[in-house]
Image (spheres, coloured by chain):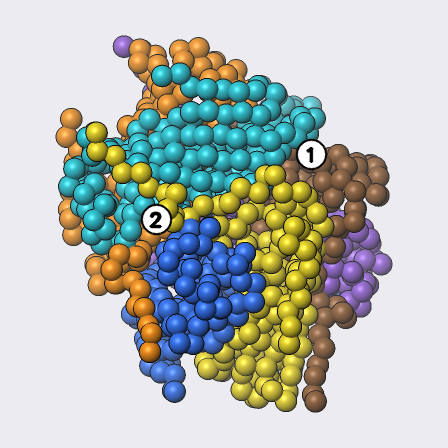
Chain colours: A orange, B cyan, C purple, D brown, E yellow, F blue
């Protein structure tokens, strides 16, 4: 009989976490959106035609965090117990810095939820402003900190 | 009578495109994921525990493109007529470069679909590899090209 | 350096519930759909072209309860352990009264799940019948009762 | 042979609109949220803990409009070409009035999209404020106007 | 410079249909659920605890058809202009036969929408009845007919 | 007063599981896709135009498992702690056999998640190959095994 077994050797799986213990977990992620100085000023003045950029981006980021397991294929579904985004407009470097903090109690962490939150918030900034600035760049999407779980505390250096 | 009218002055709206003409549109976006050399090698060798990183990231990016209007609040729903992602592993710079091309025929363009595709693909690379490399950085998410629609061709310089 | 800190002062967040205790919770919500007497009769007789109105509305309400955290931006994702909707046709007042009971065990309550269930069920009644009655009104969407959690029992008067 | 044919006689279907012509369509819907005077004042002052109520409700309403065909079972999927919500705070009657205008070009109308937008926006107001006011009531959810399509203009009286 | 180009040679893409013409399309798919005679009788009598099996399965099938492009990764998003499911209870063979007809006007067909509709309807039958019959089998999921598009009419033999 | 009470007697509900205990649960489901020998060979050779069939099907199956409670109306939302799919190409019988194992710790089991995973994976195989083989049949979708929960171990015979 001709049989070709597939998997074992490299195809995707959602790894089993059923024996991991439930702990309080927190992750903080970061993203940055570079733009023209004029775009940044219009965001501050609230004169972007599609509306108040940062309040829409904030809602988008939080909803993105909740959608993470539907967006990222091998991500476990998770209960988020809290999500907060902070935006800083930096006129010197002409960028907006976005930080997301996500918390949960569970068997897997919330790194991806925080990473997704800052990415979706940054994409929303792009969408709201693209009519006036197509050359914006989303950059430095990274994990700043996490704690909880077997691997313990992670703190990004420098 | 005490009435406070809200909107007009800055809240979000999904702008009306009903008088725009239907044209063939195309957008190409880019993202880059920096990682340790060892991580890149494990991706190439197919020894990441969660599975074949790039084939999962590719599916994720395409599904992300289709989900764009649910992820980005002020984005119009749209029919995507084609979506293709290309991954390049760059061992010199220790990064993976992701390019997404999205096409449609419609009243609005597909820039956000392409931007979302490369972001979701990059986040998926992060998710698949984060157990071995938490310090990966997603960077240079940007629009490379678009054509179609009133604003015509956009080509990023440099 | 020019920096503008945003948040703290009024932007949206999903409040942190990670220190709240898990308790058994229940919420009961209500909605009412006013319609023409003839419409109500056609629902009872099962002669609405789109199908059996109340059985579709019931499925819609239950699925709406499960979708609540994707529909309501600052709502926590939650595990619903039970959901039941009851419909009463009131021929005297020419309306359908909808009651939804939702249960869960968790750190946050299910008020929004119950409120969303009765709203979605009412909207579905509207959708199924709008070809024969565009003037239907959805009204009295409110929380009747809740129990469980720190704030304890709430019972609506009157 | 024992066969029981089901359907024809009353089960749900998504009615065939494939022979209807594509026209420009518009629908305007309304909802009202009654609340305590104190709640209304806190919304105006921006002192609700979960954030700026109306800007979150506006984003929720627009995303709700885009989600309509996933929320309402027999609703056709549709391209929305524009969506705008307006909120009026009425201190005399202690309520917030919500109006949503939705446009599209297609074979079916956007009544349900407008009705869903005002319902989801109202539910979001409830969610944002329920910690200080559980007795809010959502009321008068109705279609104000529609035009386009075979049935032409509908204008609600009084 | 060390570069490894990936794609071209076998990774997934959503094929470009932007040059295909819009035509009226229709697809009919089939599925069958085998079960114990007693289960079939309880469905007919309406004594399954979770509710009226076939009316829930019908709503599920229609919503499944609308969700197809979110469930099947390489499937194009599509406007369904009509969807109808028919259930036949066959007491001789102890099974329920499900047929779904889906229509649209577009650049790609609706085979996958019809196939998804009958699969989701069959899974719903399983879910509603599994407490009394875990050994049900879903079988014969296939395309019966399609028309429209470049490949023209397909009619399954036998 | 004319009142017609509806429910109790047969409409759908999501049954209350709030008093069931949390246990570790596992379910294994199966599906089979019959196809032409040539189609099977093209899958093995990787010459299907839409891409690598089995790796896309695997991602689809896992995402389908996570989406189960949104696809199946009366299904409880659930945390999946692991999901793995295995594909076997059978050249003798000209079919692909799909097995999905899903785990969770919760108040309800994961039978539907496993059944949905194998169904969605099979539908994805169909979608990827339908351009070369419209006559494929999905068959034998069934539960092989489950354990955990009040009803204990279930093992399908023969």
Give how far apart the Cα atoms at labels 1 and 2 are: 39 Å
The quadrant in which the C terminus of chain D is found is top right
Looking at the image, residue F127 sits to the left or right of residue A40; the answer is right
Q: Which residue corresponds to mark 2?
A: B55
Question: Residue B17's x, y, as percent?
Answer: 64, 28
SS under mark 2: helix
Q: Is residue C19 above or below residue F64?
A: above
The answer to whether residue C87 shows anywhere in this view is no
Q: Nearer the viewer, mark 1 or mark 2?
A: 2
Looking at the image, residue C1 sits to the left or right of residue C122; the answer is left
Viewer-proximal residue among C24 and B50 = B50
The quadrant in which the N terminus of chain D is found is bottom right
Viewer-proximal residue among D75 and C144 = D75
Residue located at (49% from left, 74% from top): F139
Q: Is residue E61 above or below residue A43?
A: below
Residue located at (49% from left, 43% from top): B67
* Same chain, labels 1 and 2: no
Question: Residue B20's x, y, as percent?
Answer: 67, 26
Q: Which residue corresponds to mark 1?
A: D103
């Amino acid at each position: 009989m001709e049989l070709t077994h597939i998997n074992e050797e490299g195809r995707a799986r959602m790894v089993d976490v059923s024996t991991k213990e439930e702990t309080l977990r927190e992750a903080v992620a970061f993203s940055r959106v570079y733009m023209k100085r004029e775009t940044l000023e219009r965001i501050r003045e609230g004169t972007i035609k599609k509306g108040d950029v940062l309040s829409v981006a904030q809602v988008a980021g939080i909803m993105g965090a909740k959608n993470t397991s539907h967006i990222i294929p091998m991500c476990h579904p998770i209960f988020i117990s809290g999500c907060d985004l902070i935006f800083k407009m930096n006129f010197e470097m002409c960028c907006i810095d976005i930080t997301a903090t996500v918390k949960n109690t569970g068997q897997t962490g919330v790194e991806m939820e925080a990473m997704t939150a800052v990415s979706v918030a940054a994409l929303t900034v792009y969408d709201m402003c693209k009519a006036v600035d197509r050359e914006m760049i989303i950059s430095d999407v990274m994990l700043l900190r996490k704690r909880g779980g077997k691997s313990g505390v992670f703190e990004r250096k420098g």
